Amino acid sequence: MKDNPVDCLQSTVDSHSSDERQVRRAGMDTRQILLVEDNPDDVVLTMRALTKHGLANDVIVVRDGIEALEYLRAEGPYVGRDARHLPGLVLLDLKLPRMNGLEFLKTIRSDPWLCDLRVVVLTTSSEEEDVVSSYARGASSYVRKPVDFQEFMQAVGQLGIYWLKLNESKTRSGE
């Protein structure tokens, strides 16, 4: 198992031919967001913020880490979905039922097909241990959910704009 994101990159380079990496890059939908959130109120607020900033055209909502993995791997209720089409961004809460956000991060970072997904932890936790653990498990970014409604709307909008429109990652720009 690879706990280090650098190991993920090396694993990806070692385990996939150039053609396979091109297919994966072509299959990443840079507009799609996978929102992993169990709180219905936070789902509504996040969707509202994404819509306000023109980013809610393709948001998949799942309630925990297990369901997120099922979606990404096209398993369980998502059998039949083309698993080659991965979201451009995962917004991940930490405090989730069944499989929490930290376990989810650890699992996808050890999976050669999923390990280079962009994952932004979006949580209410202000625990330093959660911040450190998230980055240690390969989070792309860690953002505390602002309590103020307007600040939340602005923060989520800025996240979406940065990660989906401005940021060039290795999965989009090549190696």
Image: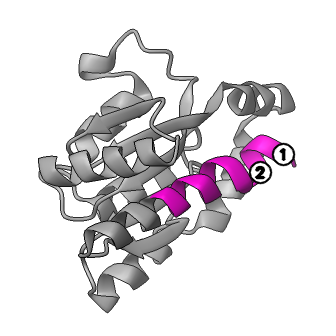
Q: Residue at x 73, y 26 (%)?
A: 26
Q: Residue at x 23, y 46 (%)?
A: 44
| Residue 147 appears in the rendering | yes
Circles 1 and 2, Cβ within 8 Å, touching? The answer is yes
Q: Is residue 56 shown in magenta?
A: no
Q: Which residue is mark 2?
A: 170
Q: Residue at x 52, y 61 (%)?
A: 159
Q: Secondary structure at mark 2?
A: helix
Answer left or right for 87 relative to 8. Answer: left
Quarter-of-image position of residue 112:
top right
Q: Secondary structure at mark 1?
A: helix
Quarter-of-image position of residue 96:
bottom left
Q: Is residue 174 shown in magenta?
A: yes
Where residue 104 appears, as percent x and y from the top left, is 34, 54
How many residues crowd mark 1 within 10 Å: few (<14), some (14–19), many (20+)? few
Which residue range is magenta in the image? Answer: 157-175
On screen, residue 61 above or below 147? above
The numbered disc on residue 173 is 1
Q: Nearer the viewer, residue 53 or 75?
A: 53
- The residue under label 2 is which amino acid type? Lys
On screen, residue 55 above or below 70? below
Q: Nearer the viewer, residue 149 or 121?
A: 149
Where residue 70 appears, as percent x and y from the top left, is 32, 30
Where residue 131 appears, as percent x and y from the top left, is 39, 81
